[in-house]
Image: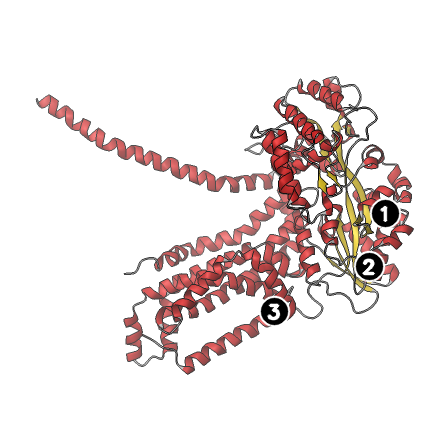
């Protein structure tokens, strides 16, 4: 049996100290690391996932460089992958590591607003000339916490070539006409009439249909999922599923692939669908056959439903917040800047002047999309809760249970509402 | 009778062989199925990496590529940022492996060959740290590194990876040191060797396969980590897993063929290391399993 003597213990201690010293040598210098705030009034950070996305990074970096150059400011950029962005921003905001301007998805604003670190940008918002629908995308809790950078919507897209082949005249305007059109398309060989989301991960796409059938989803703070209109919407969805007018196991990724291969007549996507489909489609003429359409209504005169979608730039209170707010206003409302940005990435601007710029208004697809879909788009009412994603998941999982025949629509939605109630915080 | 007897012998032989053949066939079927299960994703990775972008999303997908392109590998070679991620991965993984082996070797030796009060409690405490979900520790480690100014550095990554690999490495090496006869240490002591010398010239060389196995385990753990590498390192020091996600997975779409090409290329060094060291890995992992 061995015992450690004092000399051995000192040797081990010496080795440990050596190891720690060696590791400390790897530590970053004072200028490295995540954005640490600024010491001068004209220095701030800008955090954006687009800064590292192939399709957008050059355009976003050009805005940053252009503004920094012409205004004599220093902008420290940082980026995280989109799928991890909210977690990273939340962690760094909580730890005080994040300052300046931050790009946000409109769905995340409510969750981050709850942390109480975002600046109210009502003043620059009032001067920016933003459209009403765009402004609404940056509002939460009665405050303007984000300046809208791009505002679009998730809506229905049709392959006019397939519709013509199936003998569908014009775009369906009501749910009944839509269903009739799907039945005609179903006669085509190997075509899924409507590549609607049926996987739980994407089944939140059913929420606009629930609204179409008349459910508000949320009234005051009362979740109304499970009311008669939402049950009717799910039963209708189930009817399409049973009639094979929509297919099992489809999410956005599958739907895009099917549509790009010319094997789906309708699907739901954001305005960027054109670029995505173009990159995936072997038939390069397909984009010319893509047409956005207003979501069919239950009866003539109803307002078409669409989910608001977009990006905003928020500003963290603290050092550099003024300079960051000025940058956010420039990036989102300077007409030349937003028109050039649109030209490069095809994300629609948020100001009336930006939308009227020839570079934007000359793009027929964007104009048509804005007019038919974005104009009446509304935010998901659950976004105001930090647990909005879990609420959507609770509903989606129960809708899937209905689709596979494990539950009735009424029972499933009642169960979903019970789960969702516990997540309203 | 003779005829009956002579006929019965081959029948008995056939009966005896038949189950053997059947079990061999069953074993081969199992090997093929498990092999397919393991290799199919790699095959699909290579096929996707070689498929042109507009063919990669064909529906239904084609198992055999009808058209082949190397453009994704060319684009990969031109992406200097990816090589920076690769360099970061090598730095972090190699230092983590070395540090884990050094620290765990001393700890394991102390647990195995010394007797002192609290030894067993300490051993179980080391193992108990494995019971906490690592994601739970992320927030705590983030705050700790932020307070010490290490956030964003290689050190933050190396320390956190080493922390997670130590428990298993320590227990693995303790098992190996347990198999080294104490009489060897006593003989060395009689010959005048100090404990320090006994450890370094006798115990550690005997435990070499275990040290390599522990090092490989720590290396792979550091090489594959995503969440800690993304959260604790600044963009300039991020490793390959977050780097690949950052480069190829976007808000709107994923560049699957490019991602597959990059995944294939960056996995080659690890495959090569495993092929070279796998005999040590298997030997090291099992060395402490049976006490003689």
> Which residue does the numbered mark 1 point to in the structure image?
A338
- Read off the chain for label 3: A
Q: Residue B166: percent from the left, percent from the top?
A: 47, 63
Closer to viewer: mark 2 or mark 3: 2
Q: Residue A274: percent from the left, percent from the top?
A: 75, 35
Q: Residue at x 48, y 41 (%)?
A: B39
> Which residue does the numbered mark 2 point to in the structure image?
A324
Task: Assess disc 3: are there few (<14), some (14-19) or many (≥20) residues with their C-alpha within 10 Å of its C-alpha.
Answer: some
Give the CA distance from mark 2 to mark 3.
32 Å
Q: Does residue A194 appear to the left or right of A71 in the view shown?
A: left
Closer to viewer: mark 1 or mark 2: 2
- Read off the chain for label 1: A
Image quadrant assignment for residue B59: top right
What element does badge 3 sit on?
loop
* Colour style of the rendered protein structure: secondary structure
Q: Any mark on residue A26, and which?
A: 3
| Closer to the camera in the image, A156 or A389 | A389
Closer to viewer: mark 3 or mark 1: 1
Q: Residue A163: percent from the left, percent from the top?
A: 74, 22
| Closer to the camera in the image, A375 or A120 | A120
Q: Does residue B191 appear to the left or right of A283 in the view shown?
A: left
| Closer to the camera in the image, B87 or B204 | B204
């Amino acid at each position: 049996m061995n015992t450690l003597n004092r000399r051995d213990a000192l040797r081990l201690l010496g080795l440990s100290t050596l190891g720690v010293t060696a590791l400390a040598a790897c530590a970053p210098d004072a200028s490295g690391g995540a954005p640490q705030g600024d010491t001068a009034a004209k220095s701030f950070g800008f955090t954006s996932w687009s800064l590292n996305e192939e399709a957008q990074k050059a355009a976003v970096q050009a805005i940053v460089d252009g503004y920094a150059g012409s205004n004599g400011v220093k902008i420290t950029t940082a980026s995280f992958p989109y799928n991890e962005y909210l977690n990273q921003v939340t962690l760094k905001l909580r730890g005080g590591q994040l300052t300046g301007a931050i790009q946000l998805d409109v769905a995340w604003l409510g969750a981050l607003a709850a942390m109480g670190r975002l600046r109210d940008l009502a003043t620059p918002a009032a001067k920016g000339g933003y459209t009403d629908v765009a402004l609404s995308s940056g509002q939460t809790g009665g405050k303007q916490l984000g300046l809208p950078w791009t505002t679009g919507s998730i809506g229905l897209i049709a392959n006019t070539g397939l519709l013509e082949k199936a003998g569908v005249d014009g775009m369906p305007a009501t749910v009944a006409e839509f269903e009739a059109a799907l039945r005609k398309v179903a006669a085509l060989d190997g075509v899924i009439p409507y590549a609607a989301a049926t996987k739980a991960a994407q089944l939140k796409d059913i929420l606009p249909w629930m609204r179409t059938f008349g459910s508000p989803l949320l009234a005051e703070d009362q979740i109304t999922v499970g009311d008669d209109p939402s049950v009717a919407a799910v039963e209708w969805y189930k009817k399409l599923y049973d009639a094979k007018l929509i297919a099992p196991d489809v999410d956005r990724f599958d739907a895009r692939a099917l549509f790009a291969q010319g094997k789906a007549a309708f699907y739901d996507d954001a305005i960027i669908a054109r670029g995505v489909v173009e990159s995936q489609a072997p038939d390069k003429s397909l984009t010319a056959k893509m047409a956005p359409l207003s979501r069919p209504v239950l009866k003539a005169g109803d307002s078409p439903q669409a989910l608001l979608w977009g990006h905003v730039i928020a500003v963290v209170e603290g050092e550099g917040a003024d300079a960051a707010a000025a940058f956010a206003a420039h990036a989102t409302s300077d007409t030349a800047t937003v028109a050039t940005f649109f030209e490069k990435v095809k994300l629609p601007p948020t100001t009336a002047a930006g939308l009227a710029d020839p570079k934007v208004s000359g793009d027929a697809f964007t104009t048509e999309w804005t007019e038919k879909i974005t104009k009446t788009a509304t935010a998901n009412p659950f976004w105001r809760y930090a647990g909005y994603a879990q609420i959507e998941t609770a509903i989606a999982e129960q809708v899937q249970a209905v689709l596979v025949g494990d539950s009735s629509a009424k029972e499933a939605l009642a169960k979903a509402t019970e789960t969702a109630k516990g997540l309203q915080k | 009778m003779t005829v009956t007897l002579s006929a019965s012998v081959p029948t008995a032989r056939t009966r005896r062989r038949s189950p053997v053949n059947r079990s061999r066939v069953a074993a081969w079927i199992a090997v093929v199925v498990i092999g397919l299960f393991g290799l199919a994703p790699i095959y699909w990775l290579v096929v996707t990496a070689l498929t042109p972008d507009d063919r990669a999303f064909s529906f239904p997908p084609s198992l055999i590529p009808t058209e082949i392109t190397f453009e994704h590998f060319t684009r990969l070679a031109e992406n200097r940022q990816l090589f920076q991620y690769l360099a970061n991965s090598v730095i972090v993984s190699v230092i983590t492996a070395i540090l884990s082996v050094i620290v765990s070797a001393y700890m394991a030796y102390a647990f195995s060959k010394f007797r002192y009060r609290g030894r067993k409690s300490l051993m179980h405490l080391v193992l108990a740290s494995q019971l906490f979900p690592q994601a739970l520790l992320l927030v705590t480690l983030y705050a700790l590194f932020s307070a010490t100014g290490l956030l964003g550095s290689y050190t933050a990554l190396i320390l956190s990876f080493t922390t997670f690999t130590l428990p298993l490495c320590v227990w693995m090496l303790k098992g190996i040191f347990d198999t080294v006869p104490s009489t060897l240490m006593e003989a060395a002591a009689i010959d005048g060797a100090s404990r320090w010398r006994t450890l370094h010239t006798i115990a550690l060389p005997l435990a070499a396969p275990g040290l390599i196995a522990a090092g490989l385990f720590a290396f792979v753990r550091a090489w594959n980590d995503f969440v800690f590498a993304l959260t604790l390192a600044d963009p300039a020091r991020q490793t390959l897993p977050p780097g690949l996600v950052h480069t190829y997975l976007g808000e709107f779409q994923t560049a699957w063929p490019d991602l597959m090409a990059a995944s294939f290329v960056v996995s080659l060094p690890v495959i090569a290391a495993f092929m070279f060291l796998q005999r040590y890995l298997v030997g090291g992992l099992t060395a402490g399993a049976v006490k003689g």
